[in-house]
Amino acid sequence: GYDAHGQRVVKSQSSSASKDILDRVIDAADDLEANAAGNGKFTVYDALNARDVALTPRQVELIRRLQSGAFAHPEHDANPDYVAYFSGVDPEVSGLNSDRYEKKSRFQPSKWEKLQVRRLLHRLKCGSINMDYLEGRVRDMNDLVSKSKDEDPSGDKPFLLWKGDEEDELALRKGPQHMPAPKLPPPGHAYSYNPPEEYLPNEQELKEWEELDPEDRPYGHFVPKKHPNLRSVGAYEHAVRERFERCLDLYLCPRAMKRRLNIDPESLVPSLPKASDLRPFPTAKVVAYEVPETNATKKEDAAVMVRCLTVSPDGQFLVSGDENGVVRLWEVQTGRLLRSWDLMLVLSVGEENDDQNDKSQQGEPQTKKPVSSLEWNPNRSHHCLLATIGKCAIVISTGTGGPDDSELTDALLSAASACKHGGNIAPESRAAKAVKWTSLQHKKSSKSSSNVNANTPPISAYGTASGPICLLRTNRECTHVQWHRKGDYFVTVSPKAGAAAVLIHQLSKAASQQPFGKVKGEIQLACFHPQKPFLFVASKEHVRVYHLVKQMMVKRLMSGCRHISSLDVHGSGDHVVVGSLDRRLVWFDLDLANTPYKTLKYHERALRSVGFHPRYPLMASASDDGSIHVFHSMVYSDLMRNPLIVPVKVLRGHNVVNSLGTLAMVFHPTQPWLFSAGADGKIHLFQDL
């Protein structure tokens, strides 16, 4: 044949192929002896090249490893150490599930592991296992017991000399624990052979004792008697009977072992920091805002209730709404009344425009309606606020902005001030039947509308409009209004409107929408999430959280209250506080559970307002008992730490009138101050002094 280079391959005479079988057997035996001596080589026949090849020790090792089923190369590591693909301070993270956060409940200790640890501790205390078993040095405790017996067969361990066998029997006996009989009470003065005179019964008492059963007598069968000395005392006639009755009691009456706990009561009280270490928080009443008296209040000799409060985002102005439908704008620092708007006139304008054909109702005198809710726009560039009165929600321009803010406010209110035919709502939508937008700027023909807008010039020199701008009329009484954090959208609540109880409006487009086709329960409050597209809707007993983009319910919070009256969301968005008319203040941790994290009952009457401070770790609640409770409420970014809630101050400054006390409460946006309004017609500012 030929090789790879084209050269002829000549059969070698010295190869194994040219030898006969006997020669090959002899050569194999010689090679075996040489290998045993340590100076031989393994030789194999290469049939392709027709020659004998001597294998090196490396090749022999490879063949041996292949025959044994192992990897051929000895240096190959089948189980290498894991080398991370990414290393450093900030390793790369996959995009999958990168926007998800672990729930707070995942950080709680495992109940199963707690049970296992408790079982191991109990076995360790009983002596059935030891630390060698827990650390893995001994697999079975029986091996340890047998080993100890083998090491000490003679039993030379120390023992107690005076220990009796009965103690061993009690320790080794199985079954219920032995419980000794209760001891008899020690004898008193009546059982003495020479008792005092007051313990000796007279004849009348002896007759009364004979009529009673022995169980009802003061000393049972025993009758106190006086003896001159101890030798004169005879045998007790009822000794056997009383001993027999005691044996029956011990035999028939079950007994239970009660362990007394030696616990210091002070150790059960949680360690809270001092209130002085948690400053600042409001402590003293500094400014009082005097509500002017009207002719009606002078005749009735009663103050007008102030039902709601709101503060501008810069903290310079305060707005209040009272029982007679008047909205007043105050200056915070001086307590000066800057503007007043009578919303009853605005309400009458809206009714004239909506009910022109109903002549019977126009002649009737209109009753006063309260301003139920107020909310200043949270955007610092938008100088306007919302007020609810009767069936209407009214947009009011405050006229307090600067040159840039006034232009932004006018642009925001342009669509609402020029809206016609009920606003920019699709006629076939559900919201078209539930709400109607009415502009108050182009209604100059009626006298009432001119009175509303002409007598209220703007406060700022750059302001263009001041007063009611537009009116939103719903089918039922509107009780609550809340802005979105960006200052364009807001939500109104009408509890009696059924499916149209919650309406979401956009002020820049004068448009409205009805998010729900049907609702469960009677809706009381609604609030936007500060960061996410969530809407909190509170009924009388529950708080439901809805995702506005996905249009689905995310969570339902079980408050345990009978009637929810107020709601507020923490700035982080993970905590919600709820106040109720049954004196409960309920704190929810949305990452923990659907049930309350804390339920506080510090007030004596119904809660009217609760809220968080937007900047400081403060929370407050106002009640009908005339007091305001201020709490230090620290929320930590660490998920392993629970919120710290410490009551720090009780503020009092309002009188209870007709079972109504403090009706409204709101924090200052930048300072640790608090504004309060009550049924006595007073508005107070509490500061940290």
Image (tube, rainbow, N blue to C red):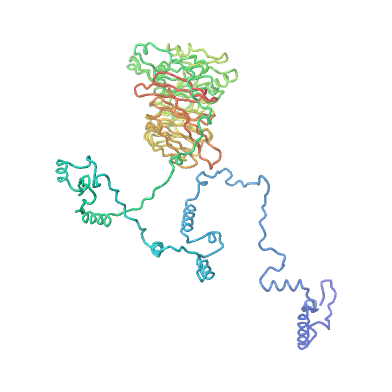
Residue 643: x %, y % from top left = 50, 37
In the foreground, 310 or 599? 599
**Is 338 left, or right, of 212 in this rendering?**
right
Q: Please, is residue 549 above or below residue 418 in the view?
A: below
> Residue 216: in sight, yes or no?
no
Quadrant placement of the N terminus: bottom right
**Which quadrant holds residue 202?**
top left
Where does the image place residue 295, in percent across and percent down from the top left?
A: 37, 10
Compare residues 444 and 455 and report the one nearer the observer: 455
Answer whether residue 36 is visible to the viewer in this image: yes
Q: Looking at this view, name the residue that lies furthest to the bottom.
A: 22
Q: Nearer the viewer, residue 248 or 293?
A: 248
Judge left or right: residue 239 versus residue 326: left
Q: How many marks?
A: 0
Residue 505 percent coordinates (x, y): 48, 28
Residue 550 % position (x, y):
50, 39
Task: Depth check: give the residue in front, 161 or 594.
Answer: 161
Determine which quarter of the picture holds residue 90: top right
Drawn side of residue 220 relative to residue 69, left or right: left
* Residue 11, above or below 287: below
- Seen in the picture, residue 430 relative to 217 is either above or below; the reply is above
Q: Quadrant of residue 47?
A: bottom right
